């Protein structure tokens, strides 16, 4: 009887599950619950920063790993769970480039833990990218009713900038006299000088003449939101989609198509040397630039008639 009473009392001495503590059949499970993934993600961010990744790469990698952890419901998933997640991404028919980004982010996550995660990097389709015609670009500009948005779009287009690069620009980066912009945080955290047109410089002067100066975290950004915050490329993308809809343009393509694919395609269509375009776009590999070496049938005929004159 005494023995039975002791067992009963021992059982009663077990605490009841509270808060986020999770219990198994024989006791506690000590893994970090989903809402506490911030701890391991902060560690991952520090690891990427120690590896000298750019701020944009760090933010992207952290987001991708966060999606993986939410799927696994573990702060340190097994390699098998990573393989299963990769299969799900493939089943969703995501672009090879997107799956590769997940792979690199998750591989770095396991490197942080001293583990090796290896997969074949998928070959990306070298399809002709979307681009807007000259008429559509003018319609986009004409449909922009806000001087700040117009200055942003013209700066992005004529500077052949990525959305993140546009959002990172500071006043000190702009040289209106030389019609140039200093890009300090390009892809891979590389620096570069880009050109703008006199028309773009004129729009920027109009914008700056009415824009109040504002420091955000000690920086004077060239563009900031009406709420006094640094621009987020996702927010600006939504504004671009509204302007595009107002311009009655149904062709696929967002900010990246507008700021990168379109000016590159138009320059090549107008006869620019591919290596010059490579320099303007700040591509390391000319193979990347060659994706834009496609022209319309009309341009092809014009060039053909001009240069094949024997």
Image (cartoon, helix red, strand yellow):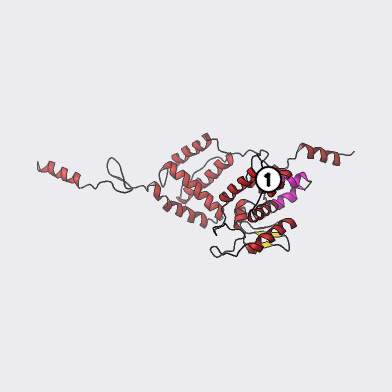
On screen, 310 above or below 193? above
Q: Residue at x 42, y 42 (%)?
A: 72
Instruction: Please name the residue that numbered disc 1 is placed on.
Output: 261
Q: Residue at x 45, y 54 (%)?
A: 42
Q: Position of residue 193 (x, y in %)?
A: 69, 58
- Is any atom of residue 180 visible in this view? yes
Q: Nearer the viewer, residue 238 or 280?
A: 238
- Apparent side of residue 181 relative to residue 94 in the rendered image (left or right): right
Magenta highlight range: 262-281
Q: Position of residue 127 (x, y in %)?
A: 66, 38
Q: Nearer the viewer, residue 57 or 234?
A: 234
- Is any atom of residue 197 visible in this view? no
On screen, 273 above or below 95? below
Q: Nearer the viewer, residue 49 or 165?
A: 165
Q: Secondary structure at mark 1?
A: helix
Q: Position of residue 119 (x, y in %)?
A: 53, 40
Q: Is residue 269 magenta?
A: yes
Given the current orientation, which residue lies at the most extreme right position?
A: 310
């Amino acid at each position: 009887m005494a023995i039975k009473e002791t067992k009963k009392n021992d059982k009663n001495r077990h605490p009841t599950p509270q808060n986020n503590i999770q219990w198994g059949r024989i006791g506690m499970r000590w893994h970090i619950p989903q809402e506490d993934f911030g701890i391991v993600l902060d560690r991952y961010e520090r690891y990427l920063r120690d590896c000298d990744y750019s701020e944009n790469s760090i933010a992207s990698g952290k987001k991708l790993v966060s999606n993986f952890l939410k799927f696994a419901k573990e702060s340190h998933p097994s390699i098998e769970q990573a393989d299963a997640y990769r299969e799900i991404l493939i089943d969703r028919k995501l672009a090879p480039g997107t799956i590769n980004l997940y792979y690199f982010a998750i591989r770095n996550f396991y490197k942080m833990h001293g583990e090796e995660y290896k997969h074949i990097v998928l070959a990306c389709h070298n399809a002709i990218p979307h681009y807007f015609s000259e008429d559509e670009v003018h319609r986009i500009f004409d449909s922009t009713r806000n001087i700040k948005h117009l200055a942003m779009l013209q700066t992005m287009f004529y500077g052949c900038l990525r959305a993140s690069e546009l959002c990172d620009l500071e006043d000190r980066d702009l040289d209106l006299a030389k019609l140039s912009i200093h890009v300090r945080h390009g892809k891979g955290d590389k620096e570069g000088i880009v050109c703008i047109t006199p028309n773009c410089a004129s729009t920027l002067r109009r914008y700056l003449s009415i824009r109040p100066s504002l420091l955000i975290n000690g920086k004077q950004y060239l563009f900031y939101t009406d709420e006094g915050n640094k621009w987020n490329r996702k927010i600006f993308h939504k504004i671009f989609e509204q302007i595009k809809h107002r311009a009655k343009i149904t062709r696929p393509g967002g900010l990246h198509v507008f700021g990168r694919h379109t000016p590159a395609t138009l320059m090549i269509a107008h006869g620019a040397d591919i290596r010059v375009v490579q320099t303007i776009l700040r591509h390391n590999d000319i193979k990347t630039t060659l994706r834009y070496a496609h022209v319309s049938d009309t341009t092809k005929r014009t060039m053909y008639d001009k240069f094949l004159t024997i």
